[in-house]
Image (cartoon, rainbow, N blue to C red):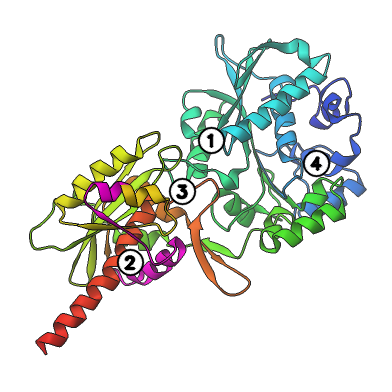
């Protein structure tokens, strides 16, 4: 990547260029401008150096443009709008050396399709607000903007598959801390690993802009390793919502803090949350997986089985079923199935009813908050539906000792293991703990499996104790 003819700061301040979309008022973007000037190795005044030190952990400004910029910024801090500005800048203002016929791509990856649309609209807004830049647009689709210089700006939901085979000139990660993927528990690391080689020849820059979440994942790792450290390759800046967006009034911030005091540390103050941790660590989950067995085990005559379902109406969540039995102290999960939406819930129930009868289960336990149709659908199939006496969070907490003692045997079921890895344990100010999936996550499979684990641990432990008492 050669030296741009115009700096990012000049492009943002020019009212005929990117500055046209900032509504003739560059002042509220002062902190962002200083962060970007530092990241691009531009000179800073003494006053700007003081602000830079405050958001960069006291480190010195980089001597040159960094390879990676990681911005840990509170909610409503202008993150997506700056992400859009950076995408437009790299596509239009930075010269790129491409081979004949090679197409360059400036890629923005967001946490979801909806968030991707927000960033796309900002990029489009920057281009259409400027009478100069709008002339550079050749074509627009729902997710891409093709420019006359041969560069395409693409905005997608995060996926390493988006990166393969592309020539990336720059890549912007939007809300990295909240990335989720159906096939991976660590989508941020997988995308990061896929992105870096694609920018080796182009000298592209990677920018991640996100509100922090729990102390896990790539964003936290970069903050832990590089915040406040003098490094000309990686820069990490961090600041509260009001630091990066002074237009937020004290009244708005106070109302948000009162509504969610625990969440305000991350959402407003840009601090990683200390009240959220992983429910199960990687080693504990891995120790529970039997990699050498089939995903499902056939019913055995001598075994007594229990079943648990997490029912769904067929539109959004998966409809899941788990069946298990006990061997000594260990609990074996024999079956873990799910039906992905859309589907007919009654047809799914009929198929599940046939399956549980093969395992001699005359009843199934399910969510305490399931809709009325669930019990009726199972009853029509000749299987009694029993509402769980415990809410989902309590089921998870009661399963924790089983995992800790190595008493759980799980199939190598990718979606189940992913959900278990992403379960979060929240410690509330009252001292009470709860367990749930994270934002944008799911726990349909883990809920069914842990329901079986908990049911077998209480039901068969009682029978075992009774058997021993009779034998004595």
Along the line of sight, which residue is nearer the eye, 180 or 105? 180
Badge 4 vs badge 2, beta-carbon distance below 8 Å: no
* In the foreground, 377 or 421: 377
Q: Which residue is mark 2?
A: 454
Work out how far the residue at label 2 is from the one at label 1, CA to CA, in angstroms. 35 Å
| Magenta stretch encompasses residue 5 | no
Q: Secondary structure at mark 3?
A: loop
Could you tell me which secondary element the residue under label 4 belongs to?
helix
Residue under the image location 79 percent in, 30 percent down: 8
Residue 62 visible, this angle: yes
What distance separates the C-alpha of mark 2 from that of mark 3?
20 Å
Where, by quadrant of the figure, is residue 174 drawn? top right
Magenta region, residue range: 377-406
Q: Is residue 412 visible?
A: no
Quadrant location of the C terminus in the rendered image: bottom left
Tag 3–tag 1 contact (CB < 8 Å): no
10 Å crowding of disc 2: few (<14), some (14-19), many (20+) = many
Q: Which residue is mark 4?
A: 32
Q: Position of residue 395 (x, y in %)?
A: 40, 65
Q: Quadrant of residue 284?
A: bottom left
Q: Identify whether 271 is placed above or below 111.
A: below
Labels 3 and 1: the sequence-earlier one:
1
**Residue at numbered disc 1:** 158
Identify the mark nearer the N-term, 4 or 3.
4
Residue on which the image places disc 3: 442
Q: Specify the label residue 110 is tagged with.
A: none
Count neighbours of disc 4 (C-alpha within 10 A) and say few if under 14, some if 14 to 19, many if 20 or more.
many
Q: Left or right of 379: which side holds 199? A: right
Whether pointer 2 and pointer 1 mark residues with C-beta atoms closer than 8 Å, the reply is no
């Amino acid at each position: 990547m050669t030296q741009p003819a115009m700096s990012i700061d000049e492009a943002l301040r020019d009212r005929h260029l990117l500055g046209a979309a900032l509504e003739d008022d560059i002042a509220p973007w002062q902190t962002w401008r200083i962060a970007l000037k530092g990241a691009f190795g531009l000179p800073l005044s003494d006053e700007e150096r003081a602000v830079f030190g405050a958001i960069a952990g006291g480190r010195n400004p980089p001597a040159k443009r960094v390879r990676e910029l990681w911005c840990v910024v509170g909610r409503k801090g202008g993150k997506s709008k700056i992400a859009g500005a950076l995408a437009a800048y790299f596509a239009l203002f930075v010269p790129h050396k491409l081979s004949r016929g090679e197409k360059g791509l400036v890629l923005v990856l967001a946490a979801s399709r909806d968030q991707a649309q927000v960033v796309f609209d900002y990029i489009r807004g920057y281009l259409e607000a400027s009478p100069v830049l709008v002339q550079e647009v050749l074509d627009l689709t729902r997710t891409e903007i093709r420019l006359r210089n041969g560069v395409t700006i693409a905005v997608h939901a995060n996926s390493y598959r988006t990166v393969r085979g592309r020539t990336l000139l720059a890549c912007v990660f939007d809300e990295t801390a909240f990335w989720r993927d159906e096939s991976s528990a660590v989508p941020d690391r997988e995308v990061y690993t896929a992105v870096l080689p694609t920018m080796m020849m182009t000298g592209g820059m990677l920018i991640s802009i996100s509100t922090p979440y729990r102390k896990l994942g790539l964003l936290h790792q970069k903050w832990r390793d590089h915040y406040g450290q003098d490094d000309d390759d990686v820069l990490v800046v961090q600041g509260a919502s009001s630091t990066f967006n002074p237009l937020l009034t004290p009244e708005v911030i106070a109302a948000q803090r009162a509504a969610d005091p625990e969440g305000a540390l991350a959402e407003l103050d840009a601090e990683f949350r200390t009240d959220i941790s992983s429910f199960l660590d990687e080693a504990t989950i891995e120790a529970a997986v039997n990699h050498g067995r089939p995903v499902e085990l056939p019913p055995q005559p001598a075994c007594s089985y229990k079943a648990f379902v997490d029912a769904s109406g067929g539109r959004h969540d998966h409809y899941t079923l788990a069946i298990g039995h006990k061997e000594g102290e260990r609990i074996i999960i024999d079956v873990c199935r799910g039906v992905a939406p859309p589907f007919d819930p009654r047809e799914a129930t009929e198929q599940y009813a046939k399956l549980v009868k093969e395992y001699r289960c005359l009843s199934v336990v399910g969510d305490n908050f399931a809709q009325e149709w669930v019990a009726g659908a199972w009853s029509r199939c000749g299987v009694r539906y029993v509402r769980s006496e415990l809410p989902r969070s309590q089921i998870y907490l009661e399963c924790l000792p089983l995992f800790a003692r190595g008493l759980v045997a799980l199939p190598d079921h990718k979606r189940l293991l992913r959900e278990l890895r992403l379960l979060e344990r929240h410690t509330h100010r009252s001292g009470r703990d709860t367990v749930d999936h994270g934002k944008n996550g799911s726990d349909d499979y883990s809920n069914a499996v842990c329901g079986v684990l908990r049911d077998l641990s209480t039901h068969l432990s009682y029978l075992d104790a009774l058997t021993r008492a009779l034998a004595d």
